[in-house]
Image (cartoon, helix red, strand yellow):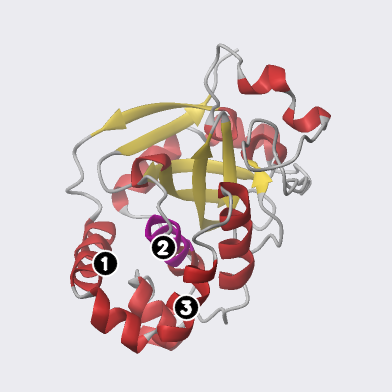
Amino acid sequence: MIKFSLLSRHLWVGILPFLVLVLMTPLRVEALPLALPGLVSAPAYEDPLFSRAQMIGSEPALLFGTEEKRSEKMKPFDKWLGVVNKMTKEQGDMPAFRAKFKDWVAYLDTLQGADMVTKIKSVNTFMNESKYIQDQTNWGESDYWASPGEFLSKFGDCEDFSIAKYMALKYLGFDPEKMRIVAVKDLNLKVGHAILAVYYQDWILILDNQIKVVAESKKILHYQPIYSINESYWWKHRAKEG
């Protein structure tokens, strides 16, 4: 379970009025179809949730319908920066990483020729089969962000699932600028949580260890994003006005 830092708590204050209105929002998600329109390698697929109009719409997709403000000031996010540093070291010695986690890497290699949606769905399903272990049990700390190598060795909690999926998709050729780790408030459970958002075409696709299917962000009603982050920027989120 993700713990909110001091910065996160300050961000949280700004959205409290909005949360009063949505605390009772029910869980509702809709699965991502295997083939999306516009995929060259996929057959044609007609579905009102993924219409051609959505693909070529003039307005960009918004993460859970929120407004966002981008910043390059990453210093407050020491846990994420620590993970990025560990990921860089793991990727820097890829032969050793491949040898140590050969089953995981071998599975990812089977996806190299697949279309993008198959890669996303397959990584989410495969990683969600891992054990969920709380940080206190695993590391003796209340909030520890594990690298993919640490997760593959000892498993982990929500942000660790998300980070491992991030690295898996990066290994498969996804642009890290199109992915974000997202710290959210679960409005049903009233706890912090972390997920992975993948920006693909005009959709924001959510990979979540608590949801079996990959879903479009606007179809998930019980999460309120606090901040999202990747290796270059972080974004503060707030409810869209109007």
Closer to the camera, 194 or 89? 89
Asked if 103 appears above or below 186 in the picture, the reply is: below
Disc 1: which residue: 87
| Residue 140 showing in the rendered view | no
Classify 10 Å Cα crowding around label 1: few (below 14), some (14-19), many (20 and above).
some
Image: magenta residue range: 162-171
Residue 163: which numbered mark, if any? 2
Residue 106: which numbered mark, if any? 3
Closer to the camera, 217 or 193? 217
Tell me the mark number nearer the camera, choosing from 3 and 2: 3
Closer to the camera, 37 or 78? 37
Identified at 52% across, 21% down, the residue is 60
Rounded to the nearest whole Å, what is the CA distance between mark 3 and mark 2?
Answer: 19 Å
Helix, strand or loop: magenta stretch: helix
Classify 10 Å Cα crowding around label 2: few (below 14), some (14-19), many (20 and above).
many
Labels 1 & 2 near each other (Cβ < 8 A):
yes
Closer to the camera, 24 or 122? 122
Relative image position of residue 214 (x, y in whole percent): 66, 52
Sequence order check, earlier mark of 1 and 2 = 1
* Residue 2 drawn in magenta: no
